[in-house]
Image (tube, rainbow, N blue to C red):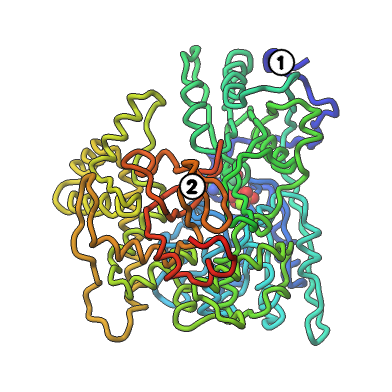
Amino acid sequence: PGTAGPGFVQERGGDAEAPVLVDPKLSHLPLSKQRQALPIYQYHRSLLYALETHRTLVIVGETGSGKTTQVPQYLHQAGWTAGGRAVVCTQPRRVAAVTVAARVAQEMGVELGEEVGYAVRFDEKCSKEVGRTALKFVTDGLLIREMMLDPLLSRYSVVMLDEAHERTVHNDILFGLLKKVMRQRSDLRLIVASATLDAEEFRDFFETADKEGDKLTATILSVQGRQHPVDILYLEAPADNYVRAAAEAALSIHETEPPGDILIFMPGAEEIDTVQMAVFEPAKPGIRKVIVATNVAETSITLDGVKYVVDPCFVRLPFYDPATGVESLVTTVTSKASATQRAGRAGRTSPGKCLRLVTETDFNSLLPARTPPEVQRTDLSGTLLLLKALGLHDIVRFDFLSPPTAEALARALELLYSLGAIDDSADITRPLGASMAELPLSPQLAKVLVASWRFGCVAEALTVAAMLSVRGPFERPRGVGAEAKQRQRSAMAAFATLEGDHITYINVYNAYCDEADGGSVDELREWCAEHCLDARSLRRAREIRGQLERYARLHAPPDHDNDLPVSKQQLRGLPSAGSDMKAVLRCLVSGFFSNAARLSSDGRYRTVREGTVLTFHPSSVLAQFGSPPEYVVYHEVVRTTQLFARDVSAVDPRWLLELAPHFFATRGGHQP
Ligand code: ADP
Ligand code: MG
């Protein structure tokens, strides 16, 4: 019965429920007409009315119905931004905050950075003139940071928590924080926007009474979209290889189905590379766009023209194990809610088809209804440090929408204590903990930066922090053959040192800056290509380093002179960089002692405290050059086929005891 080639069957229940309104292709219309054609336009009066009569408004509507771009503009027109006040709208991803701000500025016919602006980590475009920027798009993490300076968010008349269904940890924390703020500011309004139907949970969370018994009222507005029906097809028999199955499904759609673009969901960048190679086999006449995307294409960006969705029903998510302290990226089945969202992407402009690369039985029995919220599967140390800095002492009593486990909270508090960020009574320490909280970095990396004054290597610590804030400097080898790997290996050899990745990154960064300052843009690009370096990552690292340098100077000890301490030499090439880099590595250990591993007699690395077995990621210089060091610290762990440690450096075990006595002393037998 399936129409997308052999091997597929139509969903038994049938999913063609949605009423069909014809969605004209909007893009040829003038912007004002496009805006009026959006589903949310019909609701703009009731929306404003609901906000007059309730404190919190939950808006539910399909992706593309106009929540993000239109609601802030309606508020602006209705006077919510009068008198120098502003409306702030949060996004889970920085790229969404930036693109949405640009779109809204364009629709309003103003320049980005004036009436409409954005602020994300390491980047801001808002007017310097106080009260000028009326609509501000920010990441959810950034809004929490703003609360450190302005706990009641007094500049804002309305806060819009967008994409609330994604349940990011920052968004969940904002829920709890805003509930507190709402009790103190009766003029503040909150909008929660979600693309899925779990609106009651959000409304119930906010609909409570405050101390005086005044009701914090909340209501729901559902925006009826104009979703076209999407036929769901399942595999007749399970596929062994979803990457191959996805490529085959796309080819089969291309050969048998009418025109329309194809959107393929893949868990991550590596699969995306592989699928693209498989899909770019000789195409038949007539061109069809094939988009291969991660779950960012699920809700936060709008792709017009997609008629077919190929969904292997996999997603890559970080999961943190508080027992081992290991956060790993795991490729796992998506939730049913995600699969529904993904299928919906095929029905935006006309009826579509979604091919799920699983059997219907497996779909029903294996997929969870919803993805667990991030707050229940992530390392909470950074979040707790922010909450401490905001003056919330009793974390256990914090009003979480979904509470994390006691174990995860305990682990996070223990790490903060070992880092010196909180004291025996779990209060934030000053200046150390407070300085760490101000830095837009993980607590470990923040500690490295703050401690670098003491170790006399601020310049290097800045470089390391900036380089770890972008994806690795080396391009992933293009192709899979031995030749590609060899090419990358020899490129790495030009910068690699036996101390490991961190010092190597310093070498890469310094060489890049010399090159950037000495030559033209074209020469720089050529140089990067020649050395298999990712020019974009490096440019970004340089920008980030500049931003971090400003923070670093704020945290300078009172007695320092104006130059940033730099440990003396930076050597290139394979030989050890020598004793000068010791200070940098010790400084690194002062932040990353909890990520320490030792070489066991069986030739494997195990984490020092828990004994978890790890392997160096193939992109690490230590996986490629030299003999395995006895002790290492690493930046993070990724789980694919096994647990891979990324960004690894060799260290002296004595430093671990010296710099983190508490962490290693509390459990006998696990001392380095
Ligand atoms: P929602 O938040 O409900 O998912 P949006 O407000 O993001 O919806 O988008 C509404 C519509 O505006 C989209 O369907 C699309 O047509 C248009 N749109 C949004 N962003 C852009 C953009 N950057 N470029 C062009 N069109 C856009
Ligand atoms: Mg949106």
Q: Nearer the viewer, mark 1 or mark 2?
A: 2
Q: Which residue is mark 1?
A: 7
The amino acid type of the residue labelled 2 equals Ser
Q: 398 or 423: nearer the eye?
A: 423
Q: Residue at x 49, y 77 (%)?
A: 433
Q: Residue at x 77, y 53 (%)?
A: 198
Q: Is mark 1 within 8 Å of ligand 1?
A: no
Relative to 178, does residue 269 appear above or below in the rendering?
Answer: above
Q: Residue at x 63, y 71 (%)?
A: 158
Question: Looking at the picture, how far across and down is residue 88, in whole percent?
Answer: 56, 67
Q: CA distance from mark 1 to mark 2?
A: 48 Å
Q: Which residue is mark 2?
A: 600
Question: Looking at the picture, how far across and down is residue 164, in whole percent?
Answer: 67, 57
Q: Is mark 2 within 8 Å of ligand 2?
A: no
Q: In the image, 220: left or right of 35?
A: right
Q: In the image, 216: left or right of 579?
A: right
Task: Determine the image quadrant of residue 13.
Answer: top right
Q: Residue at x 84, y 25 (%)?
A: 12
Pointer 2: residues within 10 angstroms few (<14), some, or many (20+)? some
The amino acid type of the residue labelled 1 equals Gly
Q: In the image, 90: left or right of 350?
A: left
Residue 34 visible to the viewer: no
Residue 671 visible to the viewer: yes
Relative to 88, does residue 34 appear above or below in the rendering?
Answer: above
Q: 58 or 31: nearer the eye?
A: 58
Q: 620 or 508: nearer the eye?
A: 620
